[in-house]
Image: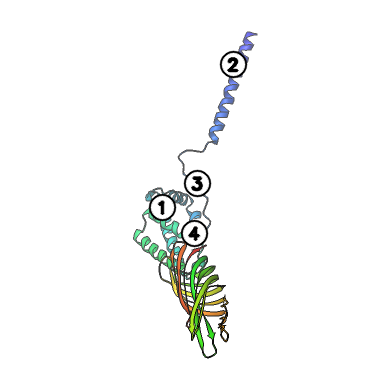
Amino acid sequence: MKKILKISTIFAFGMLLIATNSFALEKRSKRKPKGKPEVLAPYTGPGAELYQQYPKEMRVLRYAVSNSREVQSNKFSKQFQNALFNSYVAQADRILNTRDYRSLSPRDREEAQFSKSALEKLELEEDRVDELSDRVRGHLTRLESRVFRIRRRVSLELISWQSEATLVGPFENTGLLTTNLGFCPGFGVSYENRFWALSADFNGIYGTGGVSAVQGLVTYQQSNVPAFGAKMAFGAAKVVASSGSELGIRGSVLFIKQNLTEPPTSGYSIEQDKALTATLSLFSRWRLGRYYFQTDFGRHIGRSATIYSFGLGYIL
């Protein structure tokens, strides 16, 4: 009986050791191997034939480029290095022969950048790679600078403008010039690239003005007369700085309502000009990041009245 109990104990102990070893082996098998580079997914874009022909070399090179690791060029076959260089030449030629920036996909630019970086890692044809790279970079910059983009803006201007009226008397008429000062909040849209900018601005106007004139023995004077209205402006400008600052001309249409009081003296009256007027002006926008300072100097078309404004704006 003791012998049987001893054999059973040994057998149970042996089974426990086997189970423990199996669990440890299974746990170790699930651990990620240490010291091995990350395996990147196969590339499927332009130039994917290199991955099909040289999968091992491309995986190693992609890992080195992605993680800024050094490589030994003698570890890569001459056939692969020549194929990589020829691929970069073909990619560069495609970019250099493109005349529209939008016809190049982000993948095209990424592929060319990867090939350049890979060739630099291999220190292959360094002079030719640098020369091609400079040409590609310059060409992409020129193409991108021609692309028109839409920008939206909000602004607040301090505006001063003059409006004309006539003091009609029994013997003669006297021209009146009302000088107004007010605020002009609004928003605008620009269609621009790095060379030119077309813009449209829509603003509200609120201010006050005064006028004074003497005709014979009659003195006509008004002050703090409310005025309100709207302004719609369309401009064309040349971009004069790398920041995007502009200098140009624009035409505006103003609708401003302002009612001058009739003179109390019998025989005298006020004839006000039309509320709808047009102006032509020189304007500028000086940018500092998304903010800009704006100026506008002009005059009413067909009249002697002037208009000018200063303001701040923000590009959305």
Mark 1 sits on what residue? Answer: 77
- Label 4 to label 3, Cα distance in Å? 19 Å
Could you tell which of marks 2 and 4 lies nearer the N-terminus?
A: 2
Query: Where, by quadrant of the figure, is residue 263 drawn?
Result: bottom right
Report if the CB atoms under discs 1 and 3 are less than 8 Å apart: no
Element type where label 1 sits in the image: loop
Q: Residue at x 47, y 58 (%)?
A: 110
Could you tell which of marks 4 and 3 lies nearer the N-terminus?
A: 3
Q: Residue at x 61, y 15 (%)?
A: 9
Mark 3 sits on what residue? Answer: 39
Could you tell which of marks 1 and 3 lies nearer the N-terminus?
A: 3
Q: Residue at x 41, y 55 (%)?
A: 117
- Label 2 to label 3, Cα distance in Å? 47 Å
Q: Specify the amino acid type for callout 4.
A: Gly
- Against 177, is 141 above or below? above
Q: How many marks?
A: 4
Element type where label 4 sits in the image: loop
Could you tell which of marks 4 and 1 lies nearer the N-terminus?
A: 4
Residue 180, given in percent of the width and then of the height, sits at: 50, 74
Q: Specify the amino acid type for callout 3.
A: Val
Residue 312, given in percent of the width and then of the height, sits at: 47, 65
The label nearer to you, 4 versus 1, is 4
Could you tell which of marks 1 and 2 lies nearer the N-terminus?
A: 2
Q: Nearer the viewer, residue 155 or 135?
A: 155
| Residue farthest to the right, as pictured | 1
- Against 159, is 273 above or below? below
| Residue farthest to the bottom, as pictured | 171
Residue 62, given in percent of the width and then of the height, sits at: 46, 51
Mark 2 sits on what residue? Answer: 10
Report if the CB atoms under discs 4 and 1 are less than 8 Å apart: no
Q: Specify the amino acid type for callout 2.
A: Ile
Mark 4 sits on what residue? Answer: 47
